[in-house]
Amino acid sequence: MFPIPLDRPLVILDIEATGLSTRTDRIIELAAIRIDEDGTETRGYWLLNPTIDIPIETTAIHGIRDEDVKDQPTFKDKALEILMFFGEADLGGFNAGHFDIPLLQEEFKRTGIPFDIDRRRLLDAQKIFHAHESRNLAAAVRFYCGHDHEDAHGAEADAEATLEVIRGEFAKYSDLPKDMDTLDRTYNPNDPLNADRRGMLRWVNGVLTINFGKKKGESVADLVKNDPGFLKWITKNDFPFDTREICENALKGIFPKQRKDLYKPITGGR
């Protein structure tokens, strides 16, 4: 059984990709373990044609070559199947909030299928681990599970290892919160004045403003009128998904409202 009771499914995922850019790179391998409220575990695995070349230096890490995936389906081919597997589950992984989840969201966007992450809670094994030990996944497996992590950088092995580490963390740290809401709030704190997850757009006295670079402190509404090129630059470059989406909508005259509740629950299962 999972270490804590779940009030909705949890999907532990790991991705191998063509590179490290969540904006321009593509998923090659996606492995996911879905844990339902009753503890039932279901495994999903997809080997995908990324539709772009896999760099030699990337192949050196995970061992997947262009010829290995040339006859495989694309993400677009499998998007609905993947979406059905994930349903409205919470998400988990090892550093998944920084890379795996943003990249997955980008892939869904390219297919035109929305993949909402704002209302999904995140259980990141790396954040718990770094808060207590500050090392990588292989070290976490050795520390919490007592053995070496074989086949590192394979999505299936990494997803299995991450689930094993999470179990080990809950066994070792008795003070860990025992519900997903408190875990999410503890290890993924949100500043309510941030309009996006990274805080690149911020609410200042109720006004949506830029929070970086030469335009820091300027109103997004003013930029729409006086310098829309800056917002277009954000939408076309390697900024986080939600940052670009807010700017895209602003250019269309659609502005967000300052959120009061960052933790709206999802009801139901798949």
Image: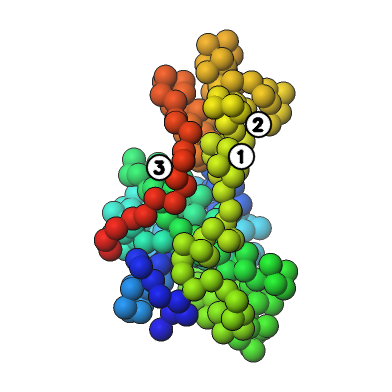
Classify residue 208 by image quadrant: top right
Q: Secondary structure at mark 2?
A: loop
Q: Are marks 3 and 1 in contact (CB under 8 Å)?
A: no
Which circle marks residue 199 in the picture?
Answer: 1
Q: Label 2, on which residue?
A: 211
User: Pointer 3: what residue?
Assistant: 109
The amino acid on which the numbered mark 3 sits, given as a three-letter code, is Lys
Q: Is residue 220 above or below residue 27?
A: above
Residue 245 pos. (x, y %): 47, 34
Between disc 3 and disc 1, the foreground one is: 1
**Which residue lies at the image location 50% right of the left edge and 39% below the top edge?**
242
Task: Name the quadrant of the C terminus.
Answer: bottom left
Q: Earlier in the sequence, mark 3 or mark 2?
A: 3
- Amino acid type of disc 2? Asn
Q: CA distance from mark 1 to mark 2?
A: 7 Å
Q: Is residue 54 visible?
A: no
Q: Mark 1 or mark 3, which is nearer the start of the sequence?
A: 3
- SS for callout 3: helix
In terms of depth relative to the viewer, which is nearer, 146 or 4?
4
Q: Residue at x 68, y 83 (%)?
A: 143
